[in-house]
Amino acid sequence: MNVDEVAPPFRIGIDIGGTFTDIVVAGAEGRLLAHKAPSTPEDRTIGVLDAIAGAARALGRDTEALLRDTDLLVHGSTVATNTLLEKKGARVGLLTTEGFRDSLEIRRGLRREVWDHRTPFPPPLVPRRLRLGVMERIGAAGEVLKPLDRDSVLRAIERFRAEGVEAIAICFLNSFRNPVHEHACRAIIQQAWPDAWVSCSGDIAPIMGEYERSTTVVANAYVGPRVVPYLRSLEARLSGLGLRHPLLIVQSNGGALSVPEVAHQPVQMVLSGPAAGVGAIRYFGRDTGSSDLVSIEVGGTSCDVTLMRDGVVQMTDQLDVEGHCIAIPSVEIHTIGAGGGTIGHVDAGGMLQAGPGGAGARPGPASYGLGGTLPTVTDAQLVLGRLAPGPYAGGAISLDLDKAARAIEQYIAGPLGLTVEQAAAGLIRLVEQNIQHAVERVSIERGYDIRNFTLIAAGGAGPLHGASVGRALGCAAVYVPRLAGVFCAFGMCNTDVRLDRIRSWYKRLDEGQSSLLEAAFGEMEAQASAALARQGFSREAIQLERGLALRYPGQQWPVSIPCEDGLAVEVIRRGFEEAHQRLYGHHQPSGEIEALGLKVAARGHLPMAAPALAEVEARRWPEPLGRRPVWINDRTGTVSTPIHDGRHLLPGDAVIGPAIIDEATTTLLVEGGQRLRVTAAGNYLIEPAQKDGAA
Amino acid sequence: MNAFAIDPIRLAVVQKQVDHISQQMGWIMTRTARSPIFSQSHDFTCFVAGASGDIIAQADGIPIHSGGGGFAVRATLQAFGEEMAEGDVYLLSDPYTAGGNHLPDWTMIRPVFVGGRLCGFTCNRAHQSDIGGGAAGTYNPEATEIFHEGIRLPVLRLVEGGKLRRDLFNLLLLNSRCPDLMEGDLNAMFGSTRIGAERVAAMLSEMGVDCGLAYFDALLRYGEARMRAEIAKLPNGIYLGEDGSDTDCFQAMEVPVRVALEIRDDTLVFDFTGSAPQIRGFKNSSLANTYSAVYVAVATFFDHSLPRNEGLFRPVSIIAPEGTVVNARPPAPMTMNTVHPATDIIYACWKALAQAAPERGCAGWGKACYGLSSGRDAEGRVFVMYHWHGASGGGAVKGRDGFPSVGHMISLGGLTLPNVEGYEQAYPVRIHRQELRRDTAGAGEFRGGPGVDYVCEVLAPTEHAIRAEGVRRPSGYGINGGLDGAVGKLEVEELGKGPRPPPQYGIQRLGPSRIRVLSSAGGGWGDPLRRDLGAVLADVLDGIISEEAARDVYGLVLTRDGRAVDHEQTSLRRALLMKA
């Protein structure tokens, strides 16, 4: 791509991953530039600045010149997640209602893998000695049963000070009905200890359920003192370097938010990064013309599955981060351990298994030559000719075919009495089956027929699997973004600013509710709009969406429905019944319905980078650069396969499979019987060849 | 043997595929069933069986259902065998005649035909909300005969050649207190087994039926090989294990479950000869349930990645004499059996297995002593509320302490405890405490999970149905030198009237009341004197154990400020205790 075409004003997305920090710069006409720099976990700011400098160089500018002409800089980072994973958060003290300090540790008995009873719970983020009860009690209807005892709060503060506590989380029973004691407690703390970092559960997650609220507020207090200083310092550095607009941070809900707003609720950042894929999916929806998309983003260790139906990305109210429940509105991402680094091994009964273990970035696959000896999916791809030996991932790594073949021989082919090629093909088949099953799960659980969806294969390792997984799923088409390897950074260039507000609303749905609901929603919307206005959004640029969490009495999980058709009780009922029918296959006509909570999603629209659409004059059938033997699939086996350089493929071009396309950040495989064409926006669409008969 | 060479890669693919089919069946069940017991508590199990009834995949479901499903399929084959036709669906529940485990679990069995040939079955075993009987909600603690426990289903041909037998269906609904729920749930069971059957048939058609069936056999052989390899690691010998209860639900008495485990090379024989005769109350086991319990014991003892197919059981034989609590004769009642004696059976087996491989030994999880309250709320609506917050502590294994206050062992803690706030919204109760009990966890190198002190004020008049185990002697036994967890205790007070000492089993009719569960705790693994000092110190600072227990049981002496380990004194103390 000619970098001259990437002209200001720029929009920049920067995504810090475990190995690389990705940057995508979108120019005025929707032209794009991608660049990767090594991540620098000890001081993440360095990797970010390196990435910006690298992109600036590629554009023939310096960092200041790039930032000065940048209208929008959106950043996603795993800093919050890593703080949780690496247990490097603040020392937190938790205040609870007297008698309930162990909810956090009992954790409702939730265990991920039931049969694996030998794996312990993750240790609670707050040890028991730092969980202290306070004399107070709010009743189930929000009434004060026992007033807050100031002395018990003061005693707790003394204890926390002596124990070196850095942040305090408060979670009182029934605070979702009435937060008065939590707020009074915070006031006492702020008075006695002005520097303390305090968060209240009812502010962070105003939902019913003391366990979920306490884990969420604790996680907030745990990551806050680590995350917020980083964000502030990064923003200061960037503005010092010429950035004239506020730095925006991606939240778990897929939208962005300014640093001061995120600082209130840093736990919102736990999915920052992957959630930005939403921006990419929405953008690609325009290019493919489909509003039903499912994406697989396959990286080094895992595969993230995200589903968009009718243009709406699926959301969830809860996340599980390493066994810690975090109850905030989030993009629903189903993650499985299937990536380039997934290790293949033969178990005690002589069966090949793909994962769940992975080689990570270090030592990584055997072929990286960084000390890894176990066979991984990347090694299998190399042995099968789908990847070429030599420079890989932008030259950061050189793939060694011999090492890959040796690892597969030693650990798979030898023990199973197979050839290296058979063993490698077997590993690929298994990992693709795992990915296929993950997509089916996401769709079946929601009652969708996946055959009506377009599969987006993204991530550095995804586009080698897209054609085969898409065929197995029966998807109409497989779409591969040219920038598949920087999917989330690209998504960040296409994000909106988004605020989610939730409020507990525990009432039966009956007549006379509408006006109460209207008033409550109105209040929430006014608050959210004001927050967006503070970030410079005009009234017209703000879009508000209302939602209700409803259930039949006795149900544990509510069903969330949008309220776009108004708040008349019968309209709400119909919406709920339809959703219940789709999700669960039945509903109770005229059954009693309970409301649990109100939601307002406030979006500040940023102008979306429109795909730069090329004029397609005539279909071309470009000649490959060369050929090499590639194992395509079980049916085709290994055949001499045309290899194309993606840089030479232009909108309108078509290629008949089997074929391999080498791209800057990824590699695509097209199977025999499939046809690939380049879309008007320069991305790839793989379809069964007979479709539209153009071949 | 078969004529097909088994390709190891393809075998792995087929294994994942059938596992995935059984999971898909589960997702559909969760999504379409009516009762919260399915959509929210997941009290069902979906499985795929081969043509002779051996389970080949059961990736989804609750532990105590595992291992028993094959009985149901084989009973169906026996009852209908040659008559079985395409489009049929069978339903059964009776533990005495139809391969059921206990009456509330209804098993639906759908034969899979490809090209007119019977190739396997897709099945769903699911706990119904109500099946009639002497008490609403399927558990009748006063039952002394199976007839008091609800309708008994022999193998029913519920759908014949694709046509639902409406008469039978109506008969079923007529025998439930909640026919609407039952109808919805049975429809969900139809749906899940139908989709499972379609997927299995498609898979077999694609592979070729003969080839596919050869792979099904290979899966069972694979499971068998994995199991034999695990067993072969254990030393040959005969190992004894005993657990049991101290009540027959009506009076205090010894109800032992005794097992003699013989390990011979790569086989296991569990011989329950010498176990108590069947009892009056509803804690008798069916053969299918006893197999399930042994299966849970074995599967949890060994590597959890063992495939859950019936090939695993080929090297395992079970001797369960008729007329005992592990294989009762009709008409003994048995609805409680998936908890008791299932837990007792698992513990007896665990204790025997632990002698052969102490490293893998599992300490006992405390048995539960909480009950359930039912009554009417302020608006006159019936409610049934389990006092789940009074759950007991789990037992330790090497490498981890026991889980604190966790669900039943038989579900491996798979049950999610409710939130206090959810309960206060849904029921006329106010919960005053749910806090771990100090000095209850069984001491050990890895200690048990502590029990909980739970206090609940029930604001309405209720019936309080009680089944209290582990209240008179410890149930969370220690292993390999670990100590037992504390006993549990149930206290009941009728407000304004004073204490109402509860029976061990039975029903109390109460006015507004206060119920306190001091739940039992899990046992420890290994000698407490080998426990990591940092872990003991943490337990003292966290109030899980007292300073005295640290000194007397763990040999840890604290510094004067009580904040650190006095290493010199501790070494002396540990040396002294080791000699003693």
Image (cartoon, rainbow, N blue to C red):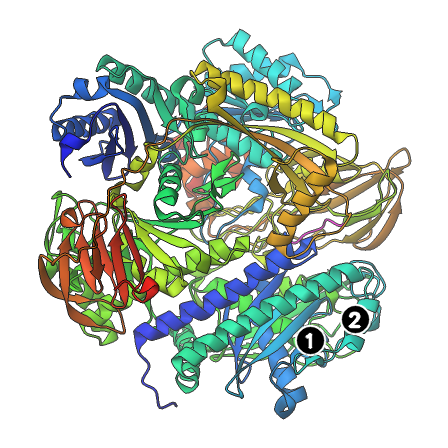
Amino acid on which disc 1 is placed:
Leu
Going 21% across and 29% down the picture, which residue do you hit?
A47
Report the side of A85 relative to A172 (left or right).
left
Residue range highlighted in magenta:
B367-371
Q: Nearer the viewer, residue A282 or A461?
A: A282
The vertical placement of A51 against B373, above or below, is above
Q: Quadrant of the N terminus of chain B?
A: bottom left
What residue do we see at 42% from left, 81% from top? Answer: B212
The answer to whether residue A586 is magenta is no
SS of the residue under disc 2:
helix
Question: Does the stretch in magenta take in B370?
Answer: yes
In this view, the residue farthest toward the bottom is: B82
The main secondary structure of the magenta stretch is loop
Of the pair B129 and B470, the residue shown nearer to us: B129
In this rendering, is residue B324 above or below A218? below
Disc 2, disc 1: CB below 8 Å? yes
The chain containing the residue under callout 1 comes to: B
Which class describes the residues within 10 Å of circle 1: few (<14), some (14-19), or many (20+)?
Answer: many
Q: Report the chain holding disc 2.
A: B
Question: Element under label 1?
Answer: strand
In the image, residue A42 lies at what x, y percent? 24, 29
- Same chain, marks 2 and 1? yes
Q: Is residue B159 left or right of residue B233?
A: right
- The residue type indicated by label 2 comes to Leu
Q: Residue B435 in the image: state x and y as whole percent.
A: 63, 35
Indicate the quadrant where residue B78 lies.
bottom right
Quickly name the residue at label 1. B91
Residue to which mark 2 is pinned? B172
